[in-house]
Amino acid sequence: MSSVATHRAAVEQEVQGPVPLNLRDVEQLAGEAVERARAKAREILTEAVARAKEMEQVATARGEKAGYDAGFAKGHEAGKVEAQAAETRRIQDATATLSEALLEVLRGVEAHRNELLAEARQDLLLLAIAMAERICRVKLAAGDEHVRPLLEEVIEHVGTSGRMVLRIHPLDADAARAFLGTLHAAMAGDDASPVTLVPDESVTRGGCVAERVNGKVDAQVETQIQRIAAELIGVECPLAAGSAAAEATGGNP
């Protein structure tokens, strides 16, 4: 299972009531991200060391053969001198080979360092987003005091001219009706058109969707978190999108 899928499995659950934040899940996800980075570094180092040993063995075999052949061709004494020279060359070659292998290890680690850091950064950002989404869901499920400031912000953003439909979760409908009653009374005699409230179970608790003929504003918590994730990571966050889809269909994560 990929890291994103793991995060989805950890946080995408429909909130039926206050749900405690499981810090063990958070610690486990963080540990998995760090362990993946460490495993990648160990793999690079192991491959480089194995290659260095192989190159050293080849150099040793060549040096021994050169000394042996030279000894038979030029006689015992001359062969000893040649063998010593060959051994010296072998040591020099092996040293050079080992040095090159170590340099290759360093180059490999450096080449993958940015990649490993980028992967770890994205994993940690997704983890932080998952924590934020879960905390928001727990808080929003605890009551409806958040409904009024949310609707005030949405109406301020879209304005009051022209007919508007507000879709909101049924559990937030009473608080929304109270606010809209106050709003309609305050706007009596103005040109503002009435706002129609529509309870909709596909809208997540604590959010709303404002619809007009020329478009709509999605103010659900997962949509806002998705926008933040897109700014931080540079791509659409499947975590928040998956939560919205699961709740819209009434399914369990």
Image (spheres, rainbow, N blue to C red):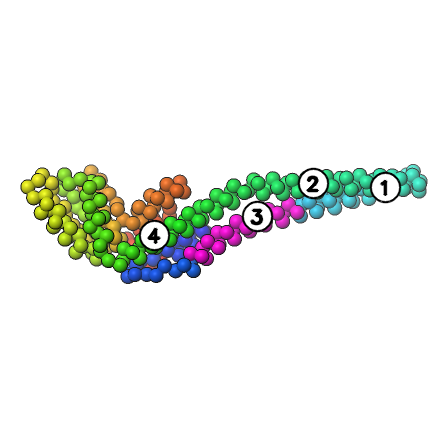
Where, by quadrant of the figure, is residue 90 drawn? top right
Residue at mark 1: 84
Disc 4 residue type (three-letter): Glu
Mark 1: give few (<14), some (14-19) or many (20+) Cα within 10 Å.
some
Of labels 4 and 3, earlier in sequence is 3
- Badge 3: residue crowd in 10 Å (few <14, some 14–19, many ≥20): some
Residue for badge 2: 99
In the image: residue 195, left or right of residue 77: left
Circle 4 packing at 10 Å, graded few (<14), some (14-19), many (20+), is many
Q: Which residue is mark 3?
A: 41
- Asked if marks 3 and 2 touch (Cβ < 8 Å), the reply is no
Q: Which structural element holds mark 2?
A: helix
Distance Cα–Cα, label 3 vs label 2: 20 Å
User: What amino acid is found at the position of numbered circle 2 in the picture?
Assistant: Ser
Q: Is residue 229 above or below residue 27?
A: above
Q: CA distance from mark 4 to mark 1?
A: 72 Å
Q: Secondary structure at mark 1?
A: helix
Bounds of the magenta segment: 26-49
Q: Which residue is mark 4?
A: 133
Instruction: Identify residue type, mark 3.
Output: Ala
Q: Position of residue 221 (x, y in %)?
A: 29, 49
Q: Is residue 46 magenta?
A: yes
Counting residues from the start of the chain, the first of labels 2 and 4 encountered is 2
Marks 1 and 3 close (CB-CB < 8 Å): no
Residue 66 visible in the displayed image: no
